[in-house]
Amino acid sequence: MANFQLIVFDWDGTLLDSTGAIAASIQAAARDLGIPEPSDERARHIIGLGLIDALRYAMPGLPEERYAEVADRYRHHYLSRDQDLMLFPGATDLIKELAESGFELAVATGKSRRGLDRALTVSGLGKYFQATRCADECHSKPHPQMLEELMATFEATPDMTLMIGDTTHDLQMAKNAGTQSLGVAYGAHPKEMLVAEAPIYCADNIAQLAAWLRGNG
């Protein structure tokens, strides 16, 4: 396990089983405000983006001044659910194993800083990640800023950095930063969309992800 120095994980849909809750919260926010409700497919596609960018995609044509209102209702609904969300089975063991094997671990997420810090505390995984970047302190994915800043923090070159995520936004960010990417097909975006972005591998579950990293990490 020495091919990569830095392994960067997305959070929602990659480590935390939260894609359904995110999509449902976006739809509930739309209903609250009498806005046309995005389809399940459209609501899931935006997972991984910063919240305002996500709402612009999910609700195109909505007056710009209304996105903050929708974001507030989204947060209300999501926060009512997030204490019940669980990490994917095997995620904790995988992160612990990678940390104990000497990898530098980081998170690059569309969550806010406040949201990620809360999630890291609740999940107990915070101690394993030496650095994190969020959408409210960097450009939203697929802009490469999150990965570029993380690589600078660890003095890691792109060829020694691996981005792992469940959306095309994650894989496109990796491409824009010049790093390798690995897709996970158990989150927000379907496998065929991920494979089209040419990741180094696409795992169907955490067990496959762990096995690949043991052999190729």
Image (cartoon, rainbow, N blue to C red):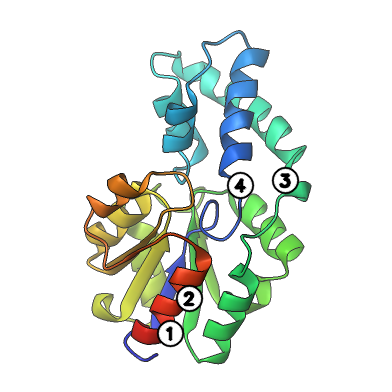
Q: Which residue is mark 1?
A: 214
Which residue is found at the position 64% from the left and 72% from the top?
A: 92
| Element on which disc 4 rests | loop
Residue at far top of view? 34
Q: Amino acid at mark 1?
A: Arg
Please state which of the two labelled residues, at mark 2 or mark 4, is closer to the viewer: 2
Asked if the residues shown at circle 3 and circle 4 are in contact, with their CB atoms under 8 angstroms apart, the answer is yes
| Element on which disc 1 rests | helix
Which residue is found at the position 42% from the left and 53% from the top?
A: 185
Mark found first going from the N terminus, 3 or 4: 4
Say whether residue 153 is visible: no
How many marks overall? 4
Asked if 178 appears above or below 144 in the picture, the reply is: below
Mark number, residue 18: 4
Q: Position of residue 63 (x, y in %)?
A: 45, 13
Q: Position of residue 169 (x, y in %)?
A: 35, 48
Q: Nearer the viewer, residue 46 or 93?
A: 93
Asked if 169 appears above or below 70 in the picture, the reply is: below
Give the spatial CA distance, label 3 vs label 2: 25 Å
Question: In which quadrant of the rendered view does residue 31 lie?
Answer: top right
> Residue 98 vs residue 182: left or right?
right
Give the spatial CA distance, label 1 vs label 4: 26 Å
Mark number, residue 82: 3
Q: Position of residue 29 (x, y in %)?
A: 63, 22
Give the spatial CA distance, label 2 vs label 1: 6 Å
Q: Which residue is mark 2?
A: 210
Asked if 65 appears above or below 72 in the picture, the reply is: above
Asked if the residues shown at circle 2 and circle 1 are in contact, with their CB atoms under 8 angstroms apart, the answer is yes
Dot 1 alpha-carbon crowd within 10 angstroms: few under 14, some 14 to 19, many 20 or more: some
Mark found first going from the N terminus, 1 or 3: 3
Q: Amino acid at mark 4?
A: Ser
